[in-house]
Image: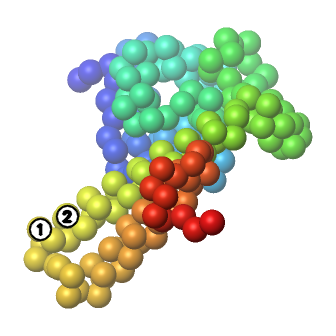
Amino acid sequence: MDAFQYELTSETTINLKYEYGGEYFTFSLYRDDMGWVLHPFDGILLRNQTMCALVVQELFKHKPFQVMLAKEGILFTDIRSTVNLENVNTPIAARNERESHANPADDLMEFVQQHSVEEVIDYECSLVGSRISFYREILQRMFMDNLGPSDPEFQKVQDIVRIYEQSLDMLSSLNGPNLDAGRRGR
Protein backbone atom coordinates (compact mmCIF):
# COMPACT_ATOMS: atom_id res chain seq x y z
CA MET A 1 0.00 0.00 0.00
CA ASP A 2 1.27 3.50 -0.85
CA ALA A 3 2.06 5.97 1.92
CA PHE A 4 -0.72 8.23 0.63
CA GLN A 5 -3.98 7.35 -1.08
CA TYR A 6 -7.08 9.33 -1.85
CA GLU A 7 -10.51 8.72 -3.28
CA LEU A 8 -12.83 11.37 -4.70
CA THR A 9 -16.22 10.38 -3.35
CA SER A 10 -17.96 13.50 -4.72
CA GLU A 11 -17.11 16.94 -6.02
CA THR A 12 -16.96 18.20 -2.44
CA THR A 13 -15.54 15.20 -0.54
CA ILE A 14 -12.20 13.42 -0.69
CA ASN A 15 -11.26 10.46 1.52
CA LEU A 16 -7.56 10.33 2.43
CA LYS A 17 -5.37 7.57 3.85
CA TYR A 18 -1.87 8.57 5.02
CA GLU A 19 0.88 6.45 6.55
CA TYR A 20 2.69 7.99 9.51
CA GLY A 21 5.00 6.04 11.81
CA GLY A 22 4.04 2.74 10.21
CA GLU A 23 0.32 3.29 10.86
CA TYR A 24 -2.38 4.40 8.42
CA PHE A 25 -4.57 7.33 9.37
CA THR A 26 -7.84 8.14 7.63
CA PHE A 27 -9.07 11.67 6.95
CA SER A 28 -11.99 13.23 5.16
CA LEU A 29 -11.40 16.44 3.25
CA TYR A 30 -14.72 18.09 2.49
CA ARG A 31 -15.93 21.51 1.37
CA ASP A 32 -18.34 23.62 3.35
CA ASP A 33 -19.40 27.27 3.10
CA MET A 34 -16.09 28.52 4.50
CA GLY A 35 -13.70 26.35 2.46
CA TRP A 36 -12.19 22.91 2.85
CA VAL A 37 -12.23 21.02 6.15
CA LEU A 38 -9.78 18.26 7.09
CA HIS A 39 -11.35 15.83 9.56
CA PRO A 40 -9.45 12.88 11.08
CA PHE A 41 -11.41 9.65 11.55
CA ASP A 42 -8.97 7.83 13.83
CA GLY A 43 -9.70 7.97 17.54
CA ILE A 44 -6.01 8.38 18.41
CA LEU A 45 -5.94 11.65 16.44
CA LEU A 46 -9.23 12.89 17.84
CA ARG A 47 -8.11 12.22 21.42
CA ASN A 48 -4.51 13.41 21.07
CA GLN A 49 -4.18 16.95 19.73
CA THR A 50 -0.37 16.84 19.63
CA MET A 51 -0.32 13.59 17.67
CA CYS A 52 -2.93 14.96 15.27
CA ALA A 53 -0.82 18.08 14.70
CA LEU A 54 2.26 15.96 13.97
CA VAL A 55 0.43 13.77 11.45
CA VAL A 56 -1.24 16.76 9.74
CA GLN A 57 2.09 18.61 9.61
CA GLU A 58 3.72 15.67 7.81
CA LEU A 59 0.69 15.22 5.57
CA PHE A 60 0.96 18.85 4.44
CA LYS A 61 4.65 18.30 3.60
CA HIS A 62 3.95 15.08 1.69
CA LYS A 63 4.40 15.74 -2.04
CA PRO A 64 1.66 13.38 -3.29
CA PHE A 65 -0.80 15.20 -0.99
CA GLN A 66 0.36 18.55 -2.39
CA VAL A 67 -0.04 17.27 -5.96
CA MET A 68 -3.54 15.99 -5.17
CA LEU A 69 -4.48 19.43 -3.79
CA ALA A 70 -3.13 21.11 -6.93
CA LYS A 71 -5.01 18.72 -9.21
CA GLU A 72 -8.24 19.40 -7.34
CA GLY A 73 -7.65 23.18 -7.22
CA ILE A 74 -7.51 23.32 -3.41
CA LEU A 75 -5.28 25.94 -1.76
CA PHE A 76 -3.51 25.29 1.54
CA THR A 77 -5.04 28.50 2.87
CA ASP A 78 -8.52 27.14 2.16
CA ILE A 79 -8.03 24.17 4.49
CA ARG A 80 -8.95 24.15 8.17
CA SER A 81 -9.24 21.27 10.62
CA THR A 82 -12.03 20.02 12.84
CA VAL A 83 -9.36 19.38 15.48
CA ASN A 84 -7.93 22.50 17.13
CA LEU A 85 -4.30 22.69 16.04
CA GLU A 86 -3.69 26.23 17.27
CA ASN A 87 -2.25 25.66 20.73
CA VAL A 88 0.27 23.06 19.67
CA ASN A 89 3.92 23.79 19.04
CA THR A 90 3.86 23.08 15.29
CA PRO A 91 4.99 24.94 12.17
CA ILE A 92 2.50 27.32 10.65
CA ALA A 93 1.71 25.03 7.69
CA ALA A 94 -0.07 22.57 9.96
CA ARG A 95 -2.14 25.26 11.67
CA ASN A 96 -5.50 26.55 10.67
CA GLU A 97 -4.93 30.18 9.76
CA ARG A 98 -8.62 31.00 9.46
CA GLU A 99 -9.41 30.23 13.06
CA SER A 100 -6.55 32.38 14.35
CA HIS A 101 -8.62 35.51 13.66
CA ALA A 102 -11.06 36.32 16.42
CA ASN A 103 -13.10 38.63 14.23
CA PRO A 104 -14.55 37.46 10.89
CA ALA A 105 -14.49 41.09 9.73
CA ASP A 106 -10.67 40.88 9.93
CA ASP A 107 -10.75 37.99 7.44
CA LEU A 108 -12.91 40.07 5.13
CA MET A 109 -10.60 43.08 5.35
CA GLU A 110 -7.56 40.90 4.76
CA PHE A 111 -9.22 39.40 1.70
CA VAL A 112 -10.16 42.84 0.35
CA GLN A 113 -6.64 44.16 0.90
CA GLN A 114 -4.94 41.19 -0.76
CA HIS A 115 -7.12 40.87 -3.87
CA SER A 116 -8.02 43.28 -6.63
CA VAL A 117 -11.56 43.37 -7.96
CA GLU A 118 -10.26 41.88 -11.20
CA GLU A 119 -8.75 38.93 -9.28
CA VAL A 120 -12.03 38.33 -7.46
CA ILE A 121 -13.95 38.41 -10.74
CA ASP A 122 -11.43 36.01 -12.35
CA TYR A 123 -11.78 33.68 -9.35
CA GLU A 124 -15.57 33.77 -9.53
CA CYS A 125 -15.41 33.13 -13.30
CA SER A 126 -13.26 30.07 -12.69
CA LEU A 127 -15.74 28.78 -10.08
CA VAL A 128 -18.67 29.26 -12.42
CA GLY A 129 -16.66 27.67 -15.26
CA SER A 130 -16.04 24.60 -13.12
CA ARG A 131 -19.77 24.34 -12.36
CA ILE A 132 -20.53 24.54 -16.10
CA SER A 133 -18.08 21.70 -16.75
CA PHE A 134 -19.59 19.65 -13.93
CA TYR A 135 -23.15 19.97 -15.26
CA ARG A 136 -22.07 19.39 -18.86
CA GLU A 137 -20.51 16.13 -17.70
CA ILE A 138 -23.81 15.21 -16.07
CA LEU A 139 -25.57 15.96 -19.38
CA GLN A 140 -23.12 13.73 -21.23
CA ARG A 141 -23.73 10.87 -18.81
CA MET A 142 -27.48 11.34 -19.01
CA PHE A 143 -27.25 11.27 -22.80
CA MET A 144 -25.16 8.08 -22.65
CA ASP A 145 -27.95 6.60 -20.49
CA ASN A 146 -30.42 7.32 -23.32
CA LEU A 147 -31.88 10.44 -21.74
CA GLY A 148 -32.10 13.40 -24.07
CA PRO A 149 -33.72 16.78 -24.65
CA SER A 150 -37.21 15.29 -24.38
CA ASP A 151 -36.55 14.17 -20.77
CA PRO A 152 -37.71 16.73 -18.12
CA GLU A 153 -34.65 16.12 -15.89
CA PHE A 154 -32.30 16.51 -18.85
CA GLN A 155 -34.03 19.81 -19.67
CA LYS A 156 -33.56 21.05 -16.11
CA VAL A 157 -29.86 20.25 -16.16
CA GLN A 158 -29.61 22.04 -19.53
CA ASP A 159 -31.29 25.05 -17.90
CA ILE A 160 -28.73 24.97 -15.09
CA VAL A 161 -25.92 25.02 -17.69
CA ARG A 162 -27.57 27.95 -19.53
CA ILE A 163 -27.97 29.92 -16.30
CA TYR A 164 -24.33 29.35 -15.36
CA GLU A 165 -23.23 30.32 -18.89
CA GLN A 166 -25.24 33.55 -18.68
CA SER A 167 -23.73 34.25 -15.25
CA LEU A 168 -20.24 33.63 -16.62
CA ASP A 169 -20.89 36.07 -19.49
CA MET A 170 -22.10 38.71 -17.04
CA LEU A 171 -19.18 38.17 -14.66
CA SER A 172 -16.65 38.23 -17.49
CA SER A 173 -18.04 41.51 -18.78
CA LEU A 174 -17.26 43.12 -15.41
CA ASN A 175 -13.54 42.72 -16.03
CA GLY A 176 -13.38 44.88 -19.09
CA PRO A 177 -15.19 46.14 -22.14
CA ASN A 178 -17.06 43.62 -24.18
CA LEU A 179 -15.53 43.69 -27.66
CA ASP A 180 -18.75 42.37 -29.19
CA ALA A 181 -20.45 45.76 -29.64
CA GLY A 182 -23.60 44.15 -31.02
CA ARG A 183 -24.47 42.72 -27.63
CA ARG A 184 -24.34 46.01 -25.71
CA GLY A 185 -26.69 48.91 -25.96
CA ARG A 186 -25.65 52.49 -25.30
- Mark 1 burial class by Cα count in 10 Å: few <14, some 14-19, many 20+: few
Is 54 drawn above or below residue 70 in the view shown?
above
- Residue toward you, 28 or 169: 169
Q: Is residue 85 left or right of residue 24?
A: right
Which residue corresponds to the image point at 55% horizontal and 41% vertical from the top-left? 122
- Residue toward you, 92 or 44: 92
| Residue 145 in view here | yes
Q: Look at label 2 and name its amino acid.
A: Gln
Q: Position of residue 9 (x, y in %)?
A: 35, 50
Q: Secondary structure at mark 1?
A: helix
Q: Secondary structure at mark 2?
A: helix
Q: Which residue is mark 1?
A: 144
Q: Is residue 93 left or right of residue 17?
A: right
The quarter holding residue 45 reads top right
- Tally the numbered discs: 2
Callout 2–callout 1 Cβ contact below 8 Å: yes
Q: Which residue is mark 2?
A: 140
The quarter holding residue 49 reads top right
Is 123 drawn above or below residue 178 in the view shown?
above
| Residue 23 in view here | no
- Cα–Cα span, label 2 and label 1: 6 Å
Q: Look at label 1 and name its amino acid.
A: Met
